[in-house]
Image (tube, grey):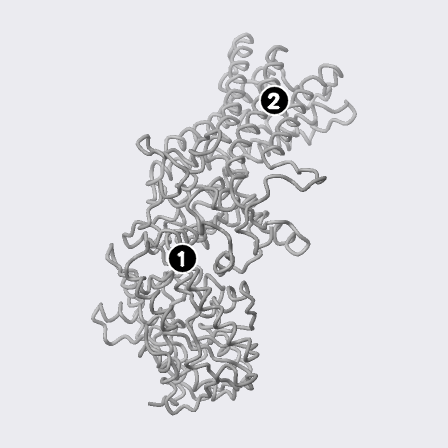
Amino acid sequence: MHAADEHARPAPESSAGRRLLPRPHQLVLLVGALAAAGTLASGILPELTGWEETSPISRKVFGNVPTPLKVAFYAAAAAGLFLVAWLSSLRLRNVERGRPDDRRTTRANARRRMEDFRRGVWMRTLLRDPAAGVMHSLIYFGFLVLFAATVLLEIDHQIPDGWKFLHGRTYQGYSFVADLAGIVFLAGLTWAFLRRYGVRPYRIRIKTKPEHLVILVVFFAIGITGFLVEGARIALAGRPAFERWSFVGWGLSGLVEGWGAGTLRDTHRWLWGAHVVSFLAFLVILPTTMLRHMFTSPMNMYWRDRPRPKGAMSPMPNLMETELETFGASTVEDFTWKQLFDTEACTICGRCTSVCPAHATGKPLDPREIVLKTGEVMTATGTPRVSPPVGVDREITVSADSLFERITPEELWACTSCKACDEICPVNIEILDKILDMRRYLVLMESNFPSSLGNVYRSMENSGNVYGLNQGDRADWVGDLGVRVVEPGSGPLDAEYLYWVGCAGSFDDRNKKASRAIAQLLARAGLDFAILGPSELCTGDSARRSGNEYIFQMLAAQNIEALDGLGVRKIITQCPHCFNTLRNEYPQLGGRYEVVHHSQLLMELIADGRLSLAGATLAERVTYHDSCYLGRHNDVYLAPRKVVGSLAGIDLVEMPRNGTRGMCCGAGGARMWMEETVGKKVNVERAQEALRTGATRIAVACPFCWVMLDDGVKGEGRDDVVVQDIAELLVEALGTSRP
């Protein structure tokens, strides 16, 4: 389904004459049926063919296992595989309740999809956290190798005598690798047990449930019984020398070397039975516990690529023309199938929780809980009901198909939309989209929003800017700089660039300094640019991210009309929020422009020599704060650093949280305009981190960040530390600052 159609409901029936395609849950059932049938066939075929390995350096499959037990094994394994498929299909039926989402594989995205899938399968995203990544890798790859060893043994068991390959040196190498994988598997499990029940990091401790212990016990049972069965088998065979390659089993077999043959036979059978039971237990818990992420997480990575840009919210129809009766998300069915599948892919790792600025400063938001609570409502209201993503307390009940049964408005309004949760998630769960879609419902359908936002909405609607100030004053910051102001309707823009100043750059006294600095640098570089002045309206970022799509569309339509009327093609932005909106979201409404942030343009101008910094020196210790909407939303990290680092004398130091893991200033998601009354203020937390670097200057590339950090620094009583836009640093170093 195309992005523009995302909010339409799928037709309940196919068009006349068109064959209905099988639904995902039906495909899973089909795969399960085929796997079960194949398992049964693999149990019957050897009995009919009688093919056996005759090499002296090999092993007999099902040695010492009576035929009735073999029959029971294959029957139970087939039933278990079909059970996995059936239980998984029930879960997928819940996911199918979601709206369409265009995640099709095409020629354009097939390569990216496979790369994302490989990243998931090979644990590359988990390894961002070395401790958790290595631990999971030991378990995951150890298990995969053991599974592959079992499959190879079964294949060798099925093929004719002349084709068999598990004998001689091949068998010995096979045995060594299998035992090594078993050791790796058990080492990973031991590490996992100590991490969850010993060291217990905060994000793990607060979400540990009984099922985690069940999973570890079942895995331990598989690994330990596997080695014990091997040891008993080798002892029963008289400990032949070639079995030394099975180094763990060989060592264990020595412990029972003196036992009688009958005792060894009985012990081997009981241990074999225990191993089979532990495997069947694994099949039962696979679809019913969080262990399902073995399959769902890589698939979620596969669907990472989407048709809209990273920084754009999902599009909505024109609110003036649509026939939809509800907007945003309040029920499970209001989310897309991908948003619902996220809840099945969640590993409950809590990395999102660990980087959330709201959670870190005592706010009610926990990104992981948004995902899990969505899953709880989905599973509790499905037909039939299935288990939640992870166990919940008995006191928690869900009585209706409403997301607000479990998620409170206070959680949603605490979000700064910094995207840190999405960025760090190792399995591509899109948490921010869920929060913003629920905000849309609260605002558009229930008018349920913080009272402080009401004033902002009125200002944007009536005055065209968030401050509610006179639009006629929008270009007053220009002063004597001689910047051209153009009027829509005056003919095509005769300048190469339109400089989009933004509300803060036009009206906020602190940010007017950045506006003047940028204009001076552009003029110094010889760029031909102009501004809209009073004709420039707020881009609507704060309205959209707080859920008020109506005001966003109203402002966007007027801005697009003005820009298109002037024939604007290239836009320079000062504010990352304007940058993101003009670049990524206006195309949804037909406004397509080449948008560049001033940090990117300054980097380019310095690199090609148009903006000479000869003789520019600033002997200061500077730390740079990453804007979330420049960084995580648009992947612009190097440009502002290169601009600052190009000055002679600069001592550029990084804060502990920087780049993709940078700490939000607290202003995004319209939090700039909301009162922060719960917990520690986010901007104070970030300002304290900046001050701990010993920097005398804090460089920013965002008007919101400037205000928030400046307030935080002053709140700490540090008048000796200056917060400045990167453009101001250049102007000061060049000695061209003007009053």
Q: At 53% from the left edge and 78% from the top edge, which residue is drawn?
A: 604
Where residue 515 sits, quadrant-wise, is bottom left
The vertical placement of 254 against 568, above or below, is: above
Could you tell me which secondary element the residue under label 1 belongs to? loop
Inter-mark Cα distance, 1 to 2: 50 Å
**Residue 491 position in % (x across, y down):** 55, 85
Residue placed most toward the observer, 247 or 183 = 183
Q: Quadrant of residue 492?
A: bottom right
- Point 68% across, 54% down: residue: 107
CB within 8 Å, label 1 to label 2 = no
Q: Position of residue 313 (x, y in %)?
A: 48, 58
Amino acid bearing label 2 = Ala
- Neighbours of disc 2 within 10 Å: few (<14), some (14-19), many (20+): many
- Find residue 166 and report its image quarter: top right
- Seen at 59% across and 25% down, the residue is 82
Image coordinates of residue 357 in percent, x first then y, are: 34, 56
Who is closer to the viewer here, 621 or 56? 621
Provide the secondary structure element on which disc 2 rests.
helix
Q: Earlier in the sequence, mark 1 or mark 2?
A: 2
Q: Is residue 309 visible?
A: yes
Of the residues shown, which amino acid type is indicated by label 1?
Gly
The residue tagged 1 is 547
Percent position (x, y) of residue 608? 55, 82
* Residue extending farthest right: 162
Q: Quadrant of the C terminus?
A: bottom left
Category of crowding for the residue at label 1, using alpha-carbon neighbours closer than 10 angstroms: few (below 14), some (14–19), many (at least 20):
many
Question: Could you say which disc has been placed on residue 281 in the image?
Answer: none
Q: Is residue 251 left or right of residue 53?
A: left
Q: Which mark is residue 78?
A: 2
